[in-house]
Amino acid sequence: MGGAIGLPMAQTQVQASAPIDAAGVVLDTSGSTIAYPSSGTVTVSLYNSSGSVMASRSFPWVLRGTGLVFANPNVVNQWESANNNGITQIKYQLAPFTAGYAAGTNTMAIATNYQGVTLTRFSTTFTSVKGSPCPSCRQQ
């Protein structure tokens, strides 16, 4: 077991004037020093040009290598297509999750990649006196 991480600021956003294929979205965690779990939840919110939320829904993600990807991108695509009228921005916010990390300074870093292109980056650091009680799950 590790500590719960995934603060409200653990979010990225993408400018989009058309629906994007969820199969091409990867939240790349390779800049992190924490160990991510094998699965979790991400909330996807769709905004219009005036900054109003047009739709929001949570979807499961899975860890593949150092990337968090949608467990079922087709479900995300269907939802997004049904709610894409006037959308100019998409935000991804991770729900809190349990992670492994060492004592000392740790980094949670996520780069939002779409079809291999980095669109946004998020990074935060925190300090732990003891680390998580899961030393074997630390990311190397």
Image (tube, rainbow, N blue to C red):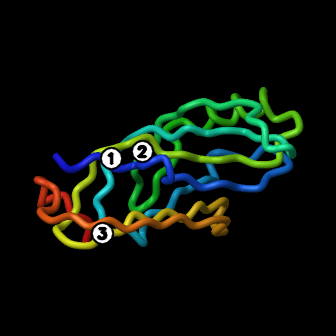
Q: Which residue is mark 2?
A: 62
Task: Name the secondary structure under disc 1.
Answer: loop
Name the disc covering residue 102, or none.
none
Measure how far apart labels 3 and 2 are at the Cα level: 22 Å
Nearer to us in this view, 61 or 101:
101
Amino acid type of disc 3? Asn
Amino acid type of disc 2? Val
Q: Residue at point 64% right, 53% down?
A: 24
Quarter-of-image position of residue 100: bottom left
Q: Would you say 51 lies left or right of 24 here?
A: right
CB under 8 Å between callouts 1 and 2? yes
Percent x, y for residue 65? 39, 60
Measure how far apart labels 3 and 1 are at the Cα level: 19 Å
Task: Name the secondary structure under disc 3.
Answer: strand
Q: Nearer the viewer, mark 3 or mark 2?
A: 3
Q: Which residue is mark 1?
A: 38
Query: Which one is earlier in the sequence, the residue at label 3 or at label 2?
Result: 2
Q: Residues within 10 Å of mark 1 (few under 14, many from 20)?
A: few
Percent x, y for residue 60? 47, 36
Q: Residue at point 22% right, 62% down?
A: 101
Position of 1 relative to 26 (above/below) = above
Query: Which one is earlier in the sequence, the residue at label 1 or at label 2?
Result: 1
Q: Which residue is mark 3?
A: 106
Nearer to us in this view, 7 or 137:
7
Measure how far apart labels 1 and 2 are at the Cα level: 6 Å
Q: Residue at point 61% right, 39% down?
A: 44
